[in-house]
Amino acid sequence: MKNTTRRAYVIYALVIAFVLGLGFLVYSFAVHGGAWAASRLNTHVFTNRVLASAGAVKDRNGTVLVETKDGKRVWNDSYNVRRATLHVVGDAQGFIATGVQTLYRAKLIGYDFFTGLYQSGGKQRDVTLTLDASVCKTALEAMNGKKGTVAAYNYKTGEVLCMVSAPTFDPLQKPWDIDTDKTGKYDGVYLNRAISGTFTPGSTFKVVTTICALENIPGVMTRKFTCTGRIKLGKGEVICNGTHGTLTLERGLNVSCNCVFAELAAELGRDKLTETVRALGFGKAVSVSGAKTVRSSFDVSKAGKADLGWAGIGQYTTLVNPVQMLMLAGAIANGGQAVTPYLVSEDDKLVSFNGLVNKNIHLSPETAEKVKKLMRSDVKNYYGDWRLPKLDFCGKTGSAEVEGKKSHAWFFGFSQREDFPVAIVVCLENGGIGLNDAIPVANKVLQKLLSSF
C-alpha cells in the first residue's frame, strides 16, 4: 500500500513537472518565438547572416525603400534616398539596432505564432513607414555632409514625416573602411542620432528655463533685465554673446541673452529647475515604434550659482535627446499636450501610442500659450519670417559650445498653420551657428513638406 502511494506521488510530481514545463515552453514560444524565427542562424531567411528573404519596407507614399527579389534584398534606386532612410529602415546585417529591419524582422519574414514561418509560401509582410522618402532626401542634402540629425513630425497625429541621421552610408556599397577608419568620419555611423543621441542643447534649452520662470516667478513677463555682457553669480560668472542693455524676457529670448537666463536659473534654484525638467519628460525614454530613445540628462545637484546659470542656458553638463526636443515643440504647439511620435503606420503591438498624449510631459495650456507667443516673436521679430516663409513659424535657435570643437547648431520649433501641424528639430553636430546653419536646413525640409502636405 505504501509503495502504491509513493508511486502515485511520483506520478503526480511528474505530471505537475510536465505541465509546468509545457506551460513554460508555450510561454517562451509566445514571447520569444518571433525572435527565434528571425535569428540570423535561420538559413531560411538569412544568407551568410544577411537578411535575404523578407517583406518590403515602404514610405508613406508607397515608395519601396527595400524589398526582396530573387532571394536578395534590393534597395531603392536613388543613392541619396538609400542613405537618407538608412537609419530608420536599418541595414540587412542588423548593425543598426533601432532600424525597422531589426525591430520588425519577425513581421517582415512573415512569422506567425500559430502557423510559424511562411517563408516558403512567399507570404512575408510589408511594413509601411510614416516617412516621406523625398523629404528625408532633401534633409540629408541640406545637411551638406555635416553630422547630426533632422526630424519632423505631425504634432497632432504623431506621424514622423522625416528622420535623418548622419554620418550615413549606402547599404548597397558599404565603405570598406567603415569599421577601421581613424579619422572620425564614421563615428556613431550605426546610431540613429535622433533616437540614440544626446547633445549639449545650448540656447534651445532657454525655452525650458522660460517655462520654469513663467510658472514660478510672478510678473516675469514684464520684468526688466540688464545685460552688460557678463553676469557674476556666486564665485563665478556667465559670459553673454553680446551687450544687450535693458531688455524684457521676450527680447531676452529673441536675442538669446545669456545674462537674462543665467540670472533666472540662479534665482529659480536647483529644485525648481529640476522639477520643470522632469515635468517636461527629460530623463525618461520614449518608445518610437519600438525604438527607445536615450534619456536626456540634467543634473545640477552639485552646481554652484554660476554652474546653475550655465545649466539654465543649456550648457554645464546638460544633454538632450533630439526626439525629446521635438516632443517639447509639439507640446507647446498643442496647448500643452505632447503626442508620442511613431514611424510605422500600420496597427501593430509595437506601435501602442499612436495619436496618444504622452503622459510623461506635463505643461499647462496657459504656459504653453505664453511660450508659443515668445517663440513666435523669435521668428517674427528677430530671425525674420523671410527665413521660414509661409509657415507662421515659432522657434528657437541654439549654438551649443563644445570644448575644443565647433558649436552644435540647433533649431527647433513648429508651424502654427492649422493645415500644417508640423514640428521640427535640427541638430548639426559641431555644425556652426543655429541662425545661419540650422534654420536653412529646417526651412528646406519644411518647404518640401509643405509642397506635398
Image (cartoon, grey):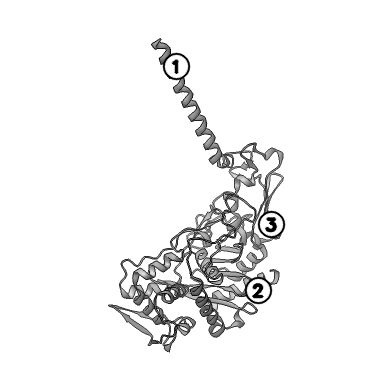
The local secondary structure at tag 1 comes to: helix
For the residue pair 20 and 260, the one nearer the viewer reads as 20
Identify the residue shown where x is 53% and y is 70%. 329
Q: Closer to the observer: label 2 or label 1?
A: 1
Amino acid carrying label 2: it is: Gln
24 with respect to 2 (left or right): right
Q: Closer to the observer: label 2 or label 3?
A: 2
The local secondary structure at tag 3 comes to: loop
Q: Quadrant of residue 38?
A: top right
Amino acid carrying label 3: it is: Asn
212 with respect to 307 (left or right): right
Residue position marked by numbered label 2 in the rendering:
447
Residue position marked by numbered label 1 in the rendering:
8
Can residue 449 be seen at all in this image of the molecule? yes
Identify the residue shown where x is 47% and y is 66%. 362
Residue position marked by numbered label 3 in the rendering:
76
Task: Return the disc, 3 or 1, that comes first in the chain's sequence.
Answer: 1
Mark 1 closeness class: few <14, some 14–19, many ≥20 residues within 10 Å: few
116 vs 361: above or below: above
Amino acid carrying label 1: it is: Ala
